[in-house]
């Protein structure tokens, strides 16, 4: 096998996100439920005989040495001693700084795909151990299922979620995750919940996102986007550390209808709409209607 093309890397949503404490090393303790959606990046990976890991497409604002896909490939090389290299190209669709886990998902798909391409034979647990140092969100993409997460995000328990669709709305900004977690006014003492608590609801009506208030205060356009959606009759929640907002719907038809209605209001005939903070066109740059996934599309590429 010399290459793998059209390798999917799906986005994730945090259906809720509670910060329950902070460790002595500065890492935050959290509880969340991850769900994958069918908004995804696409990777094209070709094996190289010279051992080099090469990024074939630039990622604006991200030096190659900091690119999680490059770091993931190097981590697998070091762990297995494989002498092959790889050229990695990415078609980005998941927005950066959106709280949708695009970089983490890309890194996980590189681990999974290169484990297959290089025939290194690591199982899921081994790949998850390689994934954690890359970022707290990376292991769930290797885990491959909707999951209740605890600790720093690495303690994962599979949860069965009902079929749902989602409207995603991205404001014209990106949010640096580190700055949100460093905020002095971030709530860090939310009372822990259990899977049984979540199982009584099984959707985004449960709990809240503790990061929302911090992001809304520091990035007013995200708050304005949430308010604009509410005025359109759409109750939204922020995913991860933002800036992307999402709303849950029983079916793809309903999510698509809501997305179309928002898109129309973003293109309203009022010539002054773009000047008003409360107009969807001024505070929402992109929208998507997405299907919630029951599992990661590469889940069966790994031996459990």
Image (cartoon, rainbow, N blue to C red):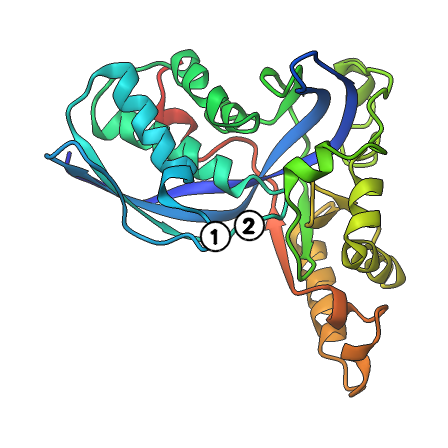
Where does the image place residue 103, in percent across and percent down from the top left?
49, 40
Closer to us: 284 or 264: 284
Instruction: Give the quarter of the figure containing the N terminus.
Output: top left
Closer to us: 295 or 154: 154
In terms of image quadrants, where is residue 220?
Answer: bottom right
Instruction: Give the quarter of the figure containing the C terminus.
Output: top left
State left or right for residue 288 relative to residue 219: left
Where does the image place residue 194, in percent across and percent down from the top left?
78, 13
Q: Residue at x 60, y 50 (%)?
A: 290
Labelled disc at residue 61: 1
Labelled disc at residue 101: none
Where does the image place residue 252, in percent across and percent down from the top left?
65, 52
Task: Identify the residue at the far left of this view.
Answer: 49
Q: Residue at x 66, y 65 (%)?
A: 285
State left or right for residue 49 relative to residue 200: left
The numbered mark, 2 or 1, whose residue comes first in the sequence reads 1
Where does the image place residue 158, in percent across and percent down from the top left?
60, 18
Crowd around label 2: few <14 · some 14–19 · many ≥20 (10 Å): many
**Location of residue 90 with respect to 209 vertically, above or below:** below
Q: Which residue is mark 2?
A: 96
Mark 2–mark 1 CB contact (< 8 Å): yes
Q: Nearer the viewer, mark 2 or mark 1?
A: 1
The span from disc 2 to disc 1 (Cα, nearest Å) is 10 Å
């Amino acid at each position: 096998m010399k290459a793998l093309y059209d390798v999917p890397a799906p986005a994730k949503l945090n259906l809720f996100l509670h910060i329950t404490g902070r460790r002595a090393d500065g890492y935050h303790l959290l509880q969340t439920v991850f769900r994958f959606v069918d908004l995804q990046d696409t990777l094209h990976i070709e094996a190289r005989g010279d051992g080099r890991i090469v990024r074939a497409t630039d990622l604006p604002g991200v030096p190659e040495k900091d690119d999680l896909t490059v770091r993931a490939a190097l981590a697998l090389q070091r762990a297995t001693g494989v002498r092959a290299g790889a050229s990695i190209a990415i078609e980005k669709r998941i927005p950066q700084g959106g709280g949708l886990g695009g970089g983490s998902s890309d890194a996980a798909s590189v681990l999974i795909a290169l484990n297959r391409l290089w025939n290194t034979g690591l199982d899921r647990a081994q790949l998850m151990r390689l994934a954690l140092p890359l970022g707290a969100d990376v292991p769930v993409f290797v885990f491959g299922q909707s999951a209740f997460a605890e600790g720093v995000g690495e303690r994962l328990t599979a949860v069965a979620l009902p079929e749902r669709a989602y409207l995603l709305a991205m404001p014209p900004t990106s949010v640096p995750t580190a700055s949100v977690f460093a905020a002095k006014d971030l709530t860090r003492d939310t009372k822990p919940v259990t899977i049984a608590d979540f199982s009584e609801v099984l959707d985004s009506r449960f709990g809240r996102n503790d990061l929302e208030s911090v992001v809304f205060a520091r990035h007013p356009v995200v708050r304005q986007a949430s308010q604009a959606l509410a005025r359109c009759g759409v109750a939204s929640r922020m995913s991860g550390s933002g800036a992307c907002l999402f709303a849950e719907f029983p079916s793809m038809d309903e999510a698509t209808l809501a997305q179309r209605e928002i898109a129309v209001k973003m293109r309203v005939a009022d010539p002054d709409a773009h000047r008003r903070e409360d107009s969807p066109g001024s505070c929402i740059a992109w929208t998507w209607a997405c299907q919630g996934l029951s599992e990661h599309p590469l889940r069966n590429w790994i031996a459990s």
